Image (cartoon, helix red, strand yellow):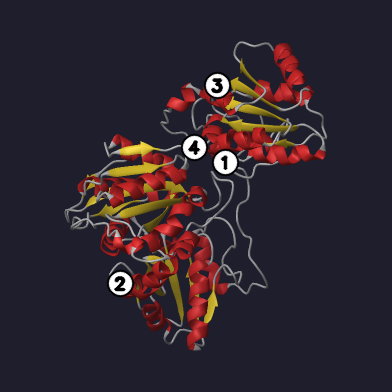
Amino acid sequence: MASETQSKSGSKTRMGDEALTQFLLENNIALVTGVYGDPCTPLLDRFTDAKLPVEISLEEKSAMAQALGASVAGKRSVVAVKQVGMNVLADPLTTAAIHGIGAGLLIICGDDPGAVKSQNEQDSRWYAKLAEVPVFTPRNPTHLAECAQQAFTISDELGIPVMLQITARLMAMSDEYKLPAKLGKAGRYDRSRPWGRFILDRHKYHFENIWPELTKRTEESTLHMLDNKSTADGVISCGYVSNFVKDVGHLALATASPLPEKLILAFLKNRKRVLIVEEIAPIVEEGVRAIVGAHGIKVEVLGRLTGHLPRVGQLERRHVESAFALSPEGLNFDTQVELSGSLNEVPCGGFELLYQVLDTVIPQDQLVAGDVGCNILQGYFAPQTIDTAFGLGTSIGTAAGMSLSGKKGVAIIGDVGFLHSGTTNLLDVIEHGHNLLVIILNNEIPAMTPGKLGSVAMAKLKSLIEACGPKSVDEVDLANDKPSDLKRLFEKRLSEKGVQVVIVKAKAVKFKMGM
């Protein structure tokens, strides 16, 4: 737990995750759902420790659906997922805004600049634009609580979900803060909003009534910070990286979508250059470029697209401070690209014997589909067992596609990945008569982003797999079974036709880079 201190002004010093937790507690949020994955894992655990009503889900669409149900029933809810989890959550999200909800629903999207603990560096804010919902981009703990308050207010009053972008650095930031005023009356679900209109009329209602009001509130929001120094150069920023800006005219936005166009136009007046400082994608940068072009303003827009800031990776203070002095001739890739040392802390070890055995029984020209979990590390380190890793729960389907080459497909997937979305893949490949071996790593925890996950399904994993109907289901324990026995089993299953599953049990231990 981070420390809390009292200042002379009566404000408190807390980290970002503490500020958000306290705000939710003060407002009696009825339900918090979410899926483990950094940077949301420590946040969800903090919510749990604080006795918020947290229900950890195996899969993001389920988490979102439950929160939507609570909202319709008049209970405020929160969903917390990492950026790649937004891909799964997006299905109900993109309908929710035009369908309408009830009580406030806040979606906390944990982005991972630099892809420190993720399979890609994805910007969740794109989903706000896709779903036509607002996304708040807080810059410090005080602003985080204030953004959450305004997000819930908008959600309650306009009947739409609202997004809040966080990063690990924002959550770990320590700052003085005061909690904003408590929320007012919760929103109520209006059944006539979806069912009194056909689909296109729902869109029409949204763009005639909801979006104009959102734009108006964005323009009037007191959460934007304006330092209108009369400098020829100016900076427009959003999120944590706003803290890197100094000694120049500065507009720090509280929202990345919609943008406060009138406020931006006023800030650009008499500027020669404006630098857009944001993580991860150039969303605000593209928006400002569109505003400048539409109004014929003669101001040069600088940022990630012009090479004045790195196109990928975390932004650092040095990037921002040196940006105006650069004369780039293309995109800038001045960023640290290497495996994170934090991998030494994840409990992904324990399966070394399995990979050693597989290295002796799988031909060198045999493709192996990995999954986005602990086994993703086997693409980097010896014996480099896997060839692909596209997403959580995808390895079984990928291996089925590989089997079309005429060779038996091989899929490696973690138990959490299997429960997340691997079950539907297994049902599909069995239904269509594919030929592959599925290896499920069973250490009973979400090890890549450790959290306190307990699942009834985990205890009945073998029964669940058998119900899907594979040709065979074997269980082995790396702590007890001999390497020679493991080798014989895998050789046998690889020689058979159809879908075979082997559950490999191991105790989770810390992964050692390089093994």
Amino acid type of disc 3? Lys
> SS at mark 2?
helix
Mark 1 against mark 4, which lies toward the viewer? 1
Mark 4 against mark 3, which lies toward the viewer? 3
Image mark for residue 392: 1
Mark 2 against mark 3, which lies toward the viewer? 3
Residue 320 seen by the camera: yes
Residue 385 seen by the camera: no
Tag 3 or tag 4, which sits nearer the N-term?
4
The residue depicted at 77 percent of the width and 31 percent of the height is 408
Q: Contact, CB < 8 Å: mark 1 with mark 2? A: no
Q: Residues within 10 Å of mark 1 (few under 14, many from 20)?
A: many
Residue assigned mark 3:
462
Per the model, the C-alpha gap separating discs 1 and 3 is 20 Å
Residue assigned mark 4:
449
Image mark for residue 246: none
The total number of labels drawn is: 4
Dividing the picture into quadrants, the one containing residue 417 is: top right
> SS at mark 1?
loop
Q: Contact, CB < 8 Å: mark 1 with mark 4? A: no
Per the model, the C-alpha gap separating discs 4 and 3 is 24 Å
- In the rendered image, the vertical position of residue 258 relative to residue 181, given as above or below: below
Q: Position of residue 271 (x, y in %)?
A: 45, 84
Tag 2 or tag 1, which sits nearer the N-term?
2
Q: Quadrant of the C terminus?
A: top right
Amino acid type of disc 4? Thr
> SS at mark 3?
helix
Q: Quadrant of the N terminus?
A: top left
Q: Position of residue 491 (x, y in %)?
A: 77, 20
Image mark for residue 217: 2
Amino acid type of disc 2? Arg
